[in-house]
Amino acid sequence: MLSLASFIIMRRHVTANEVYEFIKEAYPTIGKGTVYRNLDILVEEGALRKVEVPDGSNRFDFTLKNHYHVRCIKCGEIFDVDMDQISDLLERIHNTHGIEFVDYDISFKGIC
């Protein structure tokens, strides 16, 4: 049986479809829906992190600590950004709309 560790070898921020294609090689009868549901379960359990990509396929990240990403505007690949986390960012928001801020994702744009 495949575990999360078995596709970490991809070493990228993978899409659900890339995970499906990888797993399908070992389990040709597996359904795409099964893979997608299990990825969502792994995210809910905190074993994976989902990186939401505007105008693109969401990616899955094996680095669970808070960190930032950069997306190449030419190829669409996602990479981790090597910088310290801004620890008090939520507290620094000037809340003028009465919104309860609970989390954030920061993504930069660049060219690889």
Image: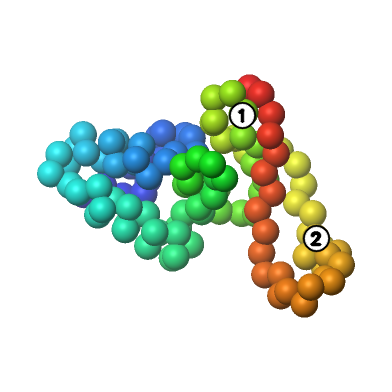
Q: Is disc 1 placed on a helix, strand or loop?
A: strand
Q: Earlier in the sequence, mark 1 or mark 2?
A: 1
Q: Quadrant of residue 72?
A: top right
Residue sitting at x 17%, y 47%:
30
Q: Nearer the viewer, residue 75 or 43?
A: 75
Q: Going 48% across and 46% down the picture, which residue do you hit?
A: 58
Q: Picture coordinates of residue 29 (x, y %)?
A: 12, 44
Query: Where does residue 16 sit, x and y in percent of width and height?
Result: 38, 44
**Position of 81 relative to 38 (above/below):** above
Q: Residues within 10 Å of mark 1 (few under 14, many from 20)?
A: some
| Residue at 28 percent of width and 36 percent of height | 21
Q: Which residue position is annotated with label 2?
A: 89
Instruction: Give the alpha-carbon distance from disc 1 to disc 2, as whole Å.
Output: 25 Å
- Residue displayed at 54% across by 31% down: 77
Please tell me in which quadrant of the rendered image residue 109 appears.
top right
Q: Looking at the image, can residue 81 be seen? A: no
Residue position for label 1: 72
Which amino acid type corresponds to the residue marked 1 in the rendered image?
Cys
Quarter of the rendering occupied by the C terminus: top right
Q: Is residue 4 visible?
A: yes
Amino acid type for the residue under numbered disc 2: Leu
| Viewer-side label of 1, 2 | 1
User: Dot 2: what SS?
Assistant: loop
Residue 17 position within the rendered picture, expressed as x and y whole percent measured from the top left: 34, 40
On screen, residue 81 versus residue 57, left or right, reads right
Mark 1 in CB contact with mark 2 (< 8 angstroms): no
Judging depth in this view, the residue of 108 and 95 nearest the camera is 95
Q: How many marks?
A: 2
Quarter of the rendering containing residue 103: bottom right
Frontmost residue, 100 versus 25: 100
- Label 2 CA crowd tier, 10 Å (few <14, some 14–19, many 20+): few
Q: Is residue 65 left or right of residue 2?
A: right
